[in-house]
Image: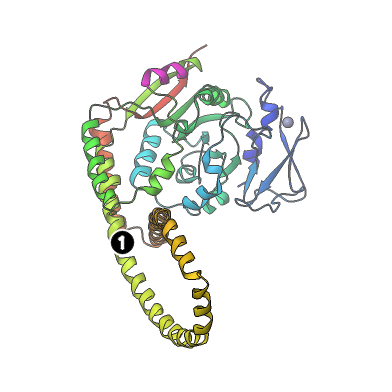
Amino acid sequence: MINHKLLEVARCPRCVATAGNDREKGRLEVVDGGFVCKTCDLAYGAFSNSGKEEPVVSAGKDLPRRGYIDLLPRQEIGQQTRYLEDEFEHELDHEHISLPLLGAKVRNDLLRKMLRPAKKDIALEVGCGDGRFCYWNRKKFGAVIGVDAAPLFAHEALDEIGLIRGDGRQLPFAPESFDKVFSLDLMEHLPLDGIEPFFTELGRVLKPDGRIFLFSNTREMGRLWPVIKLQKRVAGFFTRRGIFDFHRDELRKSDHLKAVKTWEELEYFVSQAGFTIEKKIFWNGVFQGLVDNIIIKAGEYSVRRVVRFQLDRQRKASKAQEEAASKDIRTRMASATTGLTSDWADGGGLERLRAEVESNKVTNQAEKVAAEAEEIHEENAAIDLAVRKNLKSNFARNKSGPMVVLLRVLTFMMQLDIWLFGKWRTGPFFIILKKQPK
Ligand SMILES: [Zn+2]
């Protein structure tokens, strides 16, 4: 959503870099088809959805409008996230926002508990993804704005949340604009030279008495690591037998850099940027691992079996039809080509073909195995995605169905990790930052 509240804080990313404390520099003005910077005249687009280049604002039309403003800096700064690549767009089911369940519910509950949203707060989420956390908390804050480098925003967010496409290392906002800033699952995607600008930028856009909620992780392994390692081994056992499929999860995590390795390194970056850590809770993912890596995977497997069974039945039926039709054609072709093939064989054609087949056999087989494995992953992902979409639309209609109840139980299990082990230091952490007094 593009509205006046958004324009009040959004700025030209080129101009904010040199604006210092000047809140007016880089202010945006509505023109036909988008916005221009009042300071440097650079033009920025506004779009109704990812990839749709249709203009959504014009000088004469009133705000709000559905969509987002593209304020990505024009010259590339540092390494870009892989979420910008098209294949990721296909992998991530971002079009609609579901209920907060499982890991997302654990995150969202801690966001509320630790950050304490209030009606007077103007809030910003850095790295908002499809905009789900903004959307779930839209009524808790006075206003909430989401910024992400990849414009894969959900329809609900495009309708109701102030959205900006921008870079976390050069936030396109006026200084001291926000009471609350939050960022989940983002910092671990940044390269080492992106960590300092990330914290500096959070500090720049935060009001002096504001608070930041951060969920990310270091590479530390807590005292419960042996339990988690055991789960991973169990999961590995089933994966090798083709029962569990972590292909999609691995793809998602392939973008994790975890440049901040230890808690001490985090404390260093945080204090360098002028913050102190006010609260901290760690996430020892024992129950989380049990749910994510064992229970959900087993569930996916059984659903896939049912879907495959139905697919196979359909395939067999259509194959039988096909065969009957082609049998007749083949008989007729065979009689027509007998003369031709005997000529070809006499000329040594058959020998040449045999040699060719023999030399290609080994490489062909290896390629075939790899291709088959890839095909299975793709089919698994397609089935899982279809099932997820189906579940999502079911949730929308029926918030107390048996599937939702089951997921709520699993979510409750995941929350045990926080209640039981939240004080035990490990990699994943939730923190509240506040500015050091000057
Ligand atoms: Zn400008």
The image quadrant in which ligand 1 is located: top right
**Residue 322, located in which quarter of the rendered image?**
bottom left
The residue carrying pointer 1 sits among few (fewer than 14), some (14 to 19) or many (20 or more) residues within 10 Å by Cα, namely some
Residue 282, how many percent across, how many down? 32, 29
Q: Which residues are magenta?
A: 262-270
Observer-nearest of 402 and 262: 262
- Residue farthest to the top? 438
Residue at disc 1, secondary structure: helix
Q: Is residue 49 above or below residue 43?
A: below
Instruction: Using residue 211 as the reference point, say whether residue 178 is left or right of it.
Output: right
Q: Judge whether residue 267 is colored magenta.
A: yes
Q: Amino acid at mark 1?
A: Val
Q: Which residue is mark 1?
A: 303
What residue is drawn where x is 57% and y is 45%?
A: 151
Magenta residues: mostly which secondary structure? helix
Residue 247, how many percent across, how many down? 38, 48
Observer-nearest of 222 and 430: 222
Residue 330, how many percent across, how many down? 46, 84
Instruction: Using residue 376 as the reference point, say whether residue 18 is left or right of it.
Output: right
Can see residue 409? no
Q: Is residue 300 above or below residue 120?
A: below
